[in-house]
Image: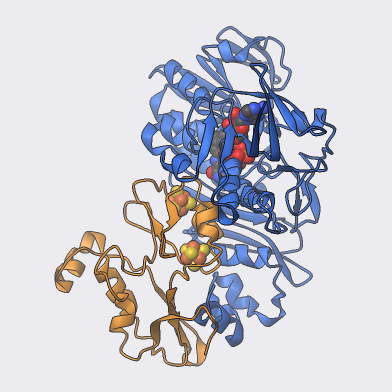
Amino acid sequence: MKKFKYIIIGNSAGAIGGVQGIRKVDQASEILIITSEPWETYSRPLISYWLQGKVKREKMHYRDPSFYKENNCRIRYNTSVEKINPQDQTMALADGEIIGYEKLLVATGSIPFVPPIKGLPKNLKESKSIFTFTTLADAIGVKKGLTNDARVVILGAGLIGLKAAEAMVNQCQSVTVVDLADRVLPSVLEDKSSDIVKKHLETQAVDFMLETSITEIRDKEVLLSNGKSLPYEILILAVGTKPQCTLIQEARGDIGRGIVTDHHQETTLKNIYAAGDCTQSLDISSETQKNLAILPNAFLQGEVAGMNMAGEEAVYDQAFPLNSVGFMGLYILSAGTYDGVAYETQTPEQYKKIFIKDNVLKGYIIIGDCMRGGIYTDLIREQTDLSTIDLKMLITSPQIMAFNQSSRKEKLAQSH
Amino acid sequence: MKRVYVNEEWCLGCHLCEIQCAFANSGEADMVKAFNNSEQKPLARITVEDGENDIHFAVSCRHCETPYCVKGCITGALTVNENGIVQIDDTRCVGCRTCILMCPYGCLTVGHNKTLLKCELCVENLGGEPSCVRRCPNNAIVFEDRDGGLL
Ligand SMILES: Cc1cc2nc3c(=O)[nH]c(=O)nc-3n(C[C@H](O)[C@H](O)[C@H](O)COP(=O)(O)OP(=O)(O)OC[C@H]3O[C@@H](n4cnc5c(N)ncnc54)[C@H](O)[C@@H]3O)c2cc1C
Ligand code: SF4
Ligand code: SF4
């Protein structure tokens, strides 16, 4: 049996964070990466940019192809891990091979949630007209079926559904987005902000059918809850994703809204760490456990996991929701939790809403001009006491001037 | 490492550093030419904030030890080079603005071609000392190594 000091399952943001974290501490020991996908690491968000024709395939890589060699990583593509045995620190691969680990990072990410709809084909992967949209393989499948006269129906007005709509709307006959919610981006935006985004997309020829669900999928046609039907050549199922926790669950590790870890990213199983979309995180802005399926979180967790795996204590305890997304020239920044006293402003260039509770910035939404928005994000991250900050200035625009002189000096005249 | 530090007591609020930064990154050798190209005025990677009571200071990338922009970048366009300088590869940036969302200091700007611009300490243009530092008339911006703490 082969044995490795470090094994990482997955090859995306969480896994790459893991490699970089390990290498901060241990430059020598080989790292084995195992991934069920056939490609070098790529940026998952870029699948919609690629489909749109905005990014070439060779620019989709999340790290330079030289990354693996430079970091002494061995990689096994097209290989799924079937089972982890934490007692003897081994794992079984799909081809039957057993390999051993000293430290393991599970960065298995998330998989699309496919709702049980009447008529759904048994094997989605073989369908030439019905797709989920989370992997490069999905995007390649969609591209094959995308013609100028294709009618596209997308189930789900969340981030992935709308990114898919943006990518396709100028390359096909029509795009209709169907969602049970009464607004677009329901988990990221509120009524008013959501309406701004919806109107913008409508002017770009994306159609919406909200408060509607698909009741049956037929060949080239879906039936809707309102009694109508929609013809389609391409149907995208993008109602959401769910954390991929099976390996840890079967090994009897704790699962909540994802794999449970401590703030060293170690799971409840010794020497097994987890990072990224597959985990549960404590959202500091709402003090609740959440599954935060966002790329920065995956990388940050992976890095902390890697450092701990290599023996240096590192802590990740600053998780909270973060989103930055653009749809056809309209940009949205959002962070934290929408709780507390709200300060809302609207100009032709920008819509903004900030939430303050117990003298701490809890969350914000900015649509349009989002310059310097990260100054707000940092107040959430650090849970900064706002009593020393000029609130009026801060609400007007994110600026360092709103801080008192000593914090300004700390920020601009000291090392970071 | 050597970084750009500002001293707000000395800043006059003249905004010259912004102009020098934009010029240094314009690729033009002649300032008049750089700014007369009126369709696409060169953009600065440094911002001067002006407050009440004559308080002014310039803000540019801190080249953080924990660079949230780099860690959050969805494409890998942002990297830390061997000297600790946080750089951006504009052939890989897709303008998603995640780095704007992540940066605690508000130091990234959207460029004319929609990719992001940031201070790279003038290593990609003139070389040597950053232009803002060199041209500040009152030494309110300095290029120093303060890693051991402020003396
Ligand atoms: C279209 C789209 C747009 C997005 N846009 C944004 C955005 O703008 N901003 C943002 O922050 N986030 C965005 N996201 C989310 C972001 O892509 C994820 O948060 C990020 O990829 C998570 O990284 P990860 O490493 O946790 O997991 P994943 O990227 O899901 O990767 C997990 C990997 O593990 C592999 N794997 C799983 N199980 C096994 C196994 N048993 N054996 C071997 N390998 C296995 C999988 O094949 C996969 O390669 C977007 C996602 C999509 C789909
Ligand atoms: S852009 Fe912002 S987060 Fe990134 S290194 Fe510079 S100051 Fe730090
Ligand atoms: S805007 Fe560019 S540099 Fe910034 S996070 Fe997105 S891809 Fe990275």
Nearer the observer, A344 or B122: B122
Name of the residue lying farthest toward the front: A1
Q: Is residue A16 above or below residue A315?
A: above
Q: Position of residue A80 (x, y in %)?
A: 63, 23
Which residue is located at x 41 percent, y 41 percent?
A66
Nearer the observer, A166 or A86: A86
Q: Is residue A295 visible?
A: no
Nearer the observer, A26 or A349: A26
Q: Is residue A273 above or below residue B23?
A: above
Name of the residue lying farthest toward the top: A219
Q: Is residue A148 above or below residue B6?
A: above
Q: Position of residue A172 (x, y in %)?
A: 41, 23
Task: Specify the quarter for ligand 1.
Answer: top right
> Which quarter of the picture shows residue B14?
bottom left
Which residue is located at x 41 percent, y 60 percent?
B82
Q: Colour of chain A?
A: blue
Q: Position of residue B110 (x, y in %)?
A: 39, 58
Q: Colour of chain B?
A: orange
Using residue B144 as the reference point, say whether residue A298 is left or right of it.
right
> Which quarter of the picture shows residue A182?
top right
Using residue A150 as the reference point, say whether residue A17 is left or right of it.
right
